[in-house]
Each structure stands twice: as structure tokens, then as C-alpha cells.
Image (spheres, rainbow, N blue to C red):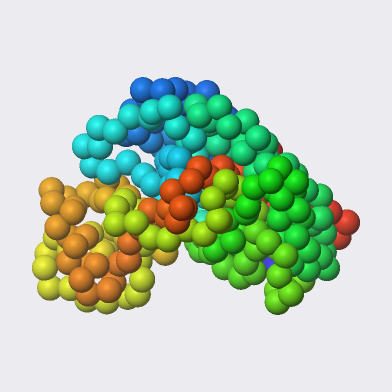
Amino acid sequence: MSDVDLRAEQYENCREAGDILAQVRDEAAERVEVGTNYLELTEWVEERIDELGGNSAFPLNISVDHEAAHGAAGIDDDRTIGEEMVKLDIGVHIDGWLADTAITVDFTGNDDLLAAAEDALDAAVDTVEAGVHTGEIGAAIESAIDGYGYNPVVNLTGHGLGHWDQHVSPNIPNREVSQGTELDVGDVVAIEPFATDGTGKVSEGSREEIYALEREGTVRNRAARQALDQITEEFRTLPFATRWLDGSRPEMALRRLQRQDIVHGYPVLKEEDGRLVSQKEHTVIVTGDGCEVTTR
Ligand code: MN
Ligand code: MN
């Protein structure tokens, strides 16, 4: 296969992942109600992605109210959605080519906060074309959110999407910055504004339900070795849930891998003032005169 064919195939896979993901996101959002069970929603999303011919690129993130990201269902999780601001962040891949999207479903009555994230994403997507500086995208996000009297979450960013790699450069800031870089034709990037009525900074909580491989390594314990084999073959460096591991004691296997720094966790990220956070995210392919949104 020539380089050109390979590249064409890459974009076809990105587009297919985006199509599947857009459908699953919209269907999942319809299923979110007060009382919806985290685990049931998560399993439904995973099965639906599978049915449509995709693969989960990371566990469904369900983050509510002041949680901005990395909330997810654990094993035997019996939590349900309350009268909250609910962010669903979902990823699909086809042969490691990724699409990443997020939507907010609100039961708190803060329509403006929801609109701020939505408008910020629209404004950001409008700026994207080959040669645009990432700081300019951030400025569009910041200005749209500021127009509502809210703040962007400044220590969360959008990101490039690589092959089997969910976070590659460049970062797409959620505010105006002078450092940064220019986007090129063919870049695949996820843009994800977060809006809040707090100061706009998140920090790590204690709960962790999402993990990823940190480095290669060897472990003596049999269960940990089996888990590591599964991780390196099935998920590679993509994030995964404890629930996805085979074996009878996945939590113990995971703890061993974490202790040896072979696997790292993603703690839930919370707005520092405990204020509400909204989010919206799309994946785009940069073109000469604009961009193609794969997750619309
Ligand atoms: Mn995402
Ligand atoms: Mn993302």
C-alpha cells in the first residue's frame, strides 16, 4: 500500500469512528434521566458501539456537577443520575483511529451554562483551518464563554488524536494563549470547551475508575501478568476500565500493576470551587480552508 492509500484509509477509519460515535452519543443522551443507573448506561453504550461495528476507545465518562471529567462506572457500581449537570464523554476507534465527543445533559436548570459550552465549541470549530494558531482557537472559546459571564476551565484542553493514542500534541487550549502551534492539513484534533460558574480550575479527586498503560514491564504475579497481556494486546495505550479485564480478581491485578507504575489511573477531575461544569466536544479533521467535523 502506498503512503497515499494508507492516509486515505486512516481518514476513512476516523470518519467511520466519528459516524458511529455521533449516533451512540445522541442515543445515549436520550437515555439519560434522573434515576438512570451508571452501569446500565455504560453497558448500553458499549454494546451499541459494538453493534454498530466500532470499538470503545475509552470507558464512558459520566461526570456530574462539579466533576469535569474521568467519572466512570466501576464494578458493581449502583450509582444513579440525580438532578445534576451530566457530562457524557465517549470515544470510538476503528483499527486504532479515533473519534472523541462529549455532550452535557442538564437537570439543574442552568441552560446558559450549557449554551456557553455549546457556543464555545461552535466558535472554536469556525476558526479551524490549516495555519490557524491554537491560541486563536482558545481565544474563541474564552470569548464565547465570557459572553455568558462564565469562565472556561483553563487547565483542561483539547488535544490531537494519534493512532492508538488518545492524547497527542497539539493541545487545544480553552483560553487565549501566546504559546502554542499552528494546525496543519490532515491533523485530527478533539476540541472540548468546559464552562463553569466557578474560577475555572480542576484538581484531582480520589476516585479512579479509568486506567491506562504507563510503560512496558514484567510482573511475577500470574493474575497481574494476564491482565497486563490483555491490556497490551487489546487496549494498548488506550484507557480502559477495571470492568473490561478478564480474570477473577481484576482489581487486585490492577493494584499490583499500579504499584509498579506499569499502569496509571485517571482520578476524577473536579472544579476546585465545587461549582457546576458543562462540556461539549467534537473531533475534527483539519482541511485547507476549514475542517470536517467527524462527530456531528
Ligand atoms: Mn472526550
Ligand atoms: Mn478529548
- Camera-nearest residue between 15 and 179: 179
Q: Position of residue 64 (x, y in %)?
A: 43, 40
The quadrant where residue 225 appears: bottom left
Looking at the image, residue 122 lies above or below residue 287: above
Residue 161 vs 170, above or below: the answer is above
Residue 135 point in image, percent of width and height: 74, 67
Q: Residue at x 57, y 46 (%)?
A: 197
Picture residue at 81% right of the left edge, 50% below the top: 126
Q: Position of residue 140 (x, y in %)?
A: 77, 55
- The foreground one among 250 and 205 is 205
Q: Judge left or right: residue 74 versus residue 30.
A: left
Q: Give the left or right position of residue 137, taking residue 33 as reference.
A: right
- Quarter of the figure with residue 35: top left
243 relative to 264, above or below: above
What is the quadrant of the C terminus in the image?
A: top right
What residue is shown at x 48% (from left), y 49% (from top)?
68
Q: Can residue 121 be seen in this view?
A: no
Q: Which of 4 and 77 is in front in this view?
A: 77
- On screen, residue 81 above or below 243: above
Residue 139 shows in the view: yes
